[in-house]
Amino acid sequence: MARRSTFFHHLHPPTIPRREVRFRYTFGLGGLAFFLFGVLAITGALEMFYYVPSLEQANASVQMLTFLVPYGWLVRGVHYWAAQSLVVIAILHLLRVVLTGAYKSPRRFNWLLGVSLLVLVVLLDFTGYVLRWDTAIEWALLVGTNLLKSIPLIGESLYGLVVGGSEVSGDTMVRFYTWHIFGLALIAAAAIGWHIFRVRRDGGISTPEPRPPDRIARDDLVKREVVAMLLATAALLLLAVVFRPELGPTGNFSQLPGEASAPWFFIWVQQLLRWGDPLPMGVLIPIGLLAILILIPYVIDRRSAGVGRWFNREGRVAQLVVLVLLTAVIGLTVLGVVK
């Protein structure tokens, strides 16, 4: 009797090249990123039942969710750690794509989608960080939004669009909540769907079609994915129980802390700001790094050879560029933490 395929089976092609599902080739990073985004969507939807996006009640509603709602602390903890993990996994996934030549033609457009998703993930994490509206977010919110003002010609307009007025106020809370849910999360969901579709349309993750074909059925892949999701769920639950996310008193922006503090994924930008003016250090350099990533398959390495091989010789320049950029960001982050 034939086994009936489920919806999850039909998300995959009938067969998959065996090499593409080997753990040592992909480390399951793409699938793990997709799973973490799903966890964020589910836990975020549960949090929406209690969260109140207003200046007076935002922090209090998070306090209530954490300390009064049954298992609310667990939902918030899983949401928090899924968000932090997603940033790390997205960066590692991008690095794996570079080191295996998966950005090369015909996958160049999907590389752009992947870079865009990384930006969306970081912005989602930042807006979610602000929504707890406690004293810890004050510096990050003021510095981050004030960077927009340093952009010539359009800075003031961008600032008003983001914060909802001429200064941080109650409208800022509503605006960030709207950005988080509708301006970022929904767009990221659509981009993820497009990204996965392009993987199938472009012929797989990055492996050229083997000859003779060495493929496995999607049933085997689904079994592996279920095991991976169970392990990831256990890890998230453990983190949520052992390392509960911090939550301070309501932020009022009347007296800022003496030491500037940014979320960990923006500490490198904070360190740059210590060395110079906001426009070059806080805006132009990050945009420049992003532009370099975007141009990798179009300028830095336009050859189609070397797809599907770790540290392929044809992509050495691109690999070196990305590793140097990543090392610089990590180095700046370490400097920012130790100071």
Image (cartoon, rainbow, N blue to C red):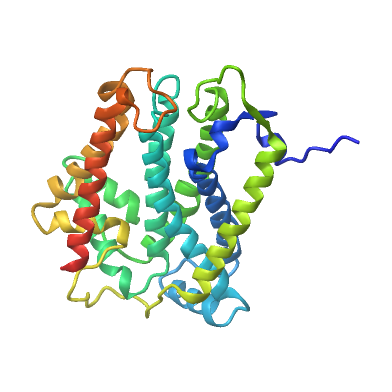
Residue 146 shows up from this direction: no
Above or below residue 131? Residue 113 is: above
221 left or right of 147 in image: right
Residue at 56% across, 23% down? 201
304 left or right of 70 in image: left
The quarter of the picture where the N terminus appears is top right
Check the image and name the residue furthest to the right.
1
Q: Nearer the viewer, residue 283 or 264?
A: 264
Query: Picture coordinates of residue 271 (x, y %)?
Result: 17, 58
The quarter of the picture where the C terminus appears is bottom left
Task: Name the image quarter holding residue 308.
Answer: top left
Check the image and name the residue furthest to the left.
276
94 left or right of 33 in image: left
Query: Picture coordinates of residue 32 (x, y %)?
Result: 53, 48
Numbered marks: total: 0
Q: Nearer the viewer, residue 219 or 18?
A: 18
Above or below residue 155? Residue 173 is: below
Residue at 65% across, 34% down? 12
Residue 19 shows up from this direction: yes
Query: Picture coordinates of residue 233 (x, y %)?
Result: 59, 61
Query: Picture coordinates of residue 274 (x, y %)?
Result: 11, 59
Residue at 51% across, 30% down? 205
Residue at 72% across, 38% down? 219
